[in-house]
Image: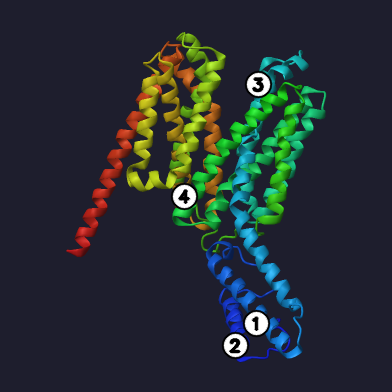
Amino acid sequence: MHIYAPCEVKTHLHRRLYKLCVCLMIGIGQSPFNPVKNVSYVTHRTTYSTIISLLFITCLVDSTIHSVYNGMLPALKKPMCIYIIFQMGVLLIHKMLKPTIISISMATVMAGAAISPALGLIAEAFPDASPTLIKLILTAPSIMIIPFSFLSSYLTSKITKRTIILIGLIIYLVGGVVPQFVSAIEWLLALRLLLGAGVGLIMPLAMSLINDYYTGKERTQMMGYNSAFSNFGGIITMLVAGWLASLGWRIPFNVYFLGLGIFILVYFFLPKGKLQKPDQNTRKSKVPLATYGYALAMGGIMLAYYSIATNMALFLEQNNIGGATLAGTVVSFTTVGGMITSLLLVQIEMTFKRLVIPVMLFGMGAAFLTLSLTNSVVLVIFSVCLIGFGQGSLFPILSLKALDSVPMHQADRAVALTSSFTFLGQFLSPVVLDGVGKIANRTSIRFQYGTLSIFILLTVLISTFLIIRASQRVALQEKEKFS
């Protein structure tokens, strides 16, 4: 490794300071002009601060010595200045890493719902289009997200995650922004499908990047922040899109220009990373059954959670509680609940520990039971907020458990599985609940919420029993080990 030393090191103190800096650089495996490895952004943040401080001291000593010998204060040595600027850039990249990763998730949240305020205007602009086709404009991205999530997982062994995300964002921008310039409903639908393809490439990597760069409590905290800011981004997007819809059906598509800002962040601040190539011994290993279990659980939770968005307006009308305006307000409280619990995720997990999943499920089950019995607006809002609270904590926790259940090279596949089951649950929510109502010959939404509460509370009982039994088994094994 070639070391770019300052010219004419004149004192023993100066020489020692510079050697210490060099030793620190070698200790973390870095050369002054070599790229920093991914892990260094997180693991060695303190070391980088120390290096920069010592380099500044070295340069100041150098300048002082020259001023004594030469009677003037010369400019700092060019190689050292370049290195300091480089390391300051490293620290900036580290500071921007969290906002960059979180911004990627915000892009995926606004994939479909961003243009929902303009659906009525789109229907007026295309009077010959069927109502089903108009609704497909909203849901079409979901159809493409599932297959492209698995494609994204496969591509991580061929190209870097950063490259996949940048390609996905380009597709996202084209599929999101260009529809405002088309005049045929078929082209509009095709571009929405393209948007879904871009989101499918991005979505699994947004969560797997957290798994790559963070560990322990910081990883859990990042999952919570990721969920919270995604919800916040969804709220802001809906408000902006609603305002833009008042200017015409084409204008709300400009919301997708947010992808350009995310592209810039990813291009400048996301490390290149390495290919996710498995070892020869693990290349043919299968995804564990537990991972499918966590993915299935996330699909079931989304099936229940999405019933609020699809059924709340009808529920309020059927029970003479309120109309469309109140329905919009009530549904927004699911996001509020989700944001609160996402920000408190570490504290929630530390409080309930192994029972965190049953406790959060119990809250959701109790909320659906309350909805099936009440006519009070206050209780409806409280119940919906509690459902958002449960979903906002369960999704990050189950995602982390799914990631922990697989080896590192299968992390992207695990995220693709959980993402796919989540969208599948969203798609099947109205189909399954309406089907249950038809089988029971009950068409009321109140009955659907009551049925959900029964299934969720039964799941709580079963999961609690299994967790307690597993804990007892572990305690017994430890007792036998020490006896």
Q: Nearer the viewer, residue 103 or 162?
A: 103
Q: Earlier in the sequence, mark 2 or mark 4?
A: 2
Q: Quadrant of residue 168?
A: top right
Marks 3/2: CA–CA distance: 74 Å
Q: Which residue is disc 4 drawn over? A: 220
Q: Are the residues flagged by discs 1 and 2 in contact, CB closer than 8 Å? A: yes
Q: Quadrant of residue 12?
A: bottom right
Q: Which residue is disc 3 drawn over? A: 135
Which label belongs to residue 448?
A: none
**Which secondary structure, mark 1?**
helix
Q: Quadrant of residue 245?
A: top right
Q: Is residue 285 above or below residue 316?
A: below
Q: Nearer the viewer, residue 229 or 387?
A: 229
Marks 3/1: CA–CA distance: 70 Å
Q: Which residue is disc 1 drawn over? A: 61
Q: Earlier in the sequence, mark 3 or mark 2?
A: 2
Q: Position of residue 391 (x, y in %)?
A: 46, 35
Of the residues shown, which amino acid type is indicated by label 3? Lys
Q: Earlier in the sequence, mark 1 or mark 4?
A: 1
Q: Are the residues flagged by discs 3 and 1 in contact, CB closer than 8 Å? A: no
Marks 1/4: CA–CA distance: 44 Å
* Left or right of 63, for residue 430: left
For the point 61% across and 40% down, which residue is it?
Answer: 106
Q: Is residue 360 above or below residue 53?
A: above
For the point 65% across and 44% down, which residue is it?
Answer: 201
Of the residues shown, which amino acid type is indicated by label 2? Leu
**Which secondary structure, mark 4?**
helix
